[in-house]
Amino acid sequence: MSRSTPKGLEVIDVSVTYPGERGAQPVAAVRGVSLHVPQGSTVALLGPSGCGKSTLLRAVTGLESLAGGLIRFDGQDLADVPVHRRDFGLVFQDGQLFAHRDVAGNIDYGLVMHHVPRAERVQRVTELLRLVGLEGYESRSVATLSGGQRQRVALARALAPRPRLLLLDEPLSALDRDLRERLSHDLRNILRSTGTTALYVTHDHGEASVVAERVLTMSEGQLVPTT
Ligand code: ADP
Ligand code: MG
């Protein structure tokens, strides 16, 4: 790799357009966005509902195709890398836990997929539960967890396979204000202490500045230039 290749995520002049349905105009949801998430750092994407945050995140995940531009990770163009080969972790607003598995079974999931031996999985689950402040919760049913605890489990699950990039889409938005504030500080500490490279989407300014080292503002599909 050449010395000039930046490590981490690079989004370069990316556009995403949804086809107009039933004769409607196509929606240019993301228009010419460029950003860099340096290795080991967290960048927040802040903006009101409908400005294109989730669309951009989905494009980075590989779930939306690009109308223009390119996405690179550690210098590699991801155009031909399918979703499951990108090694990215995802956390959504509703953690979408597997209701029929216990907490350990949820966190374990990606490790089973990666054929990690059982003893190592058990150890990793213990380590992650400690990290997210849920020590000893291994065999709890996810149905008995509070909203905040569920999001902690979702975070642990996403981090378990040591993704090279973590993508979070409004992970705290379904929680009430006090909890959101507390969890945003915890989240910041967890991302920093694990050296995670992360792109954090939110519509909450306070949350963005707590969690991320750098906040980028988006409006109507574009980044708002910083002055
Ligand atoms: P945000 O996450 O910032 O709220 P989105 O990325 O979800 O914004 O949406 C950006 C724009 O794209 C909005 O105008 C939304 O209505 C539109 N959009 C999102 N998903 C689709 C879709 N699957 N088909 C058509 N339009 C969509
Ligand atoms: Mg969204």
Image (spheres, grey):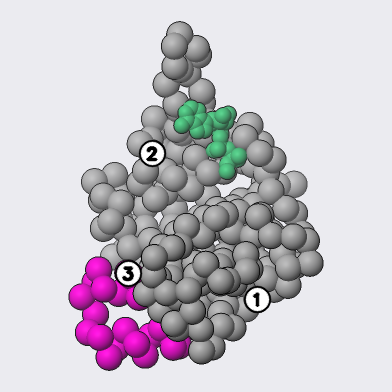
Q: CA distance from mark 3 to mark 2?
A: 22 Å
Asked where in the image residue 187 lies, by quadrant, the reply is bottom right
Q: Residues within 10 Å of mark 3 (few under 14, many from 20)?
A: some
What kind of residue is marked 3?
Gly
Residue plotted at (29% across, 44% down)? 79
What kind of residue is marked 2?
Glu
Q: CA distance from mark 3 to mark 1?
A: 23 Å
Q: Residue 170: percent from the left, percent from the top?
A: 60, 54
Q: Residue 219: percent from the left, percent from the top?
A: 66, 36
Q: Would you say the magenta stretch is mainly helix, strand or loop?
A: helix
Q: CA distance from mark 2 to mark 1?
A: 31 Å
**Lateral position of residue 39 relative to residue 146, left or right:** left
Q: Earlier in the sequence, mark 2 or mark 1?
A: 2
Residue plotted at (45% across, 38% down)? 14
Q: Earlier in the sequence, mark 3 or mark 1?
A: 3
Query: What segment carries the magenta color?
Result: 107-129
- The answer to if 208 sits in the magenta stretch is no
Q: Residue 173: percent from the left, percent from the top?
A: 66, 54
Q: Identify the residue position indicated by label 3 in the image.
A: 110
Q: Earlier in the sequence, mark 3 or mark 2?
A: 2
User: Which mark is drawn over residue 64?
Assistant: 2
Q: Of the residues tagged 3 and 2, which is closer to the observer?
A: 3
Is the CB of mark 1 within 8 Å of ligand 2? no
Q: Is residue 6 visible?
A: no
Q: Identify the residue position indicated by label 1 in the image.
A: 186
Is the CB of mark 2 within 8 Å of ligand 1? no
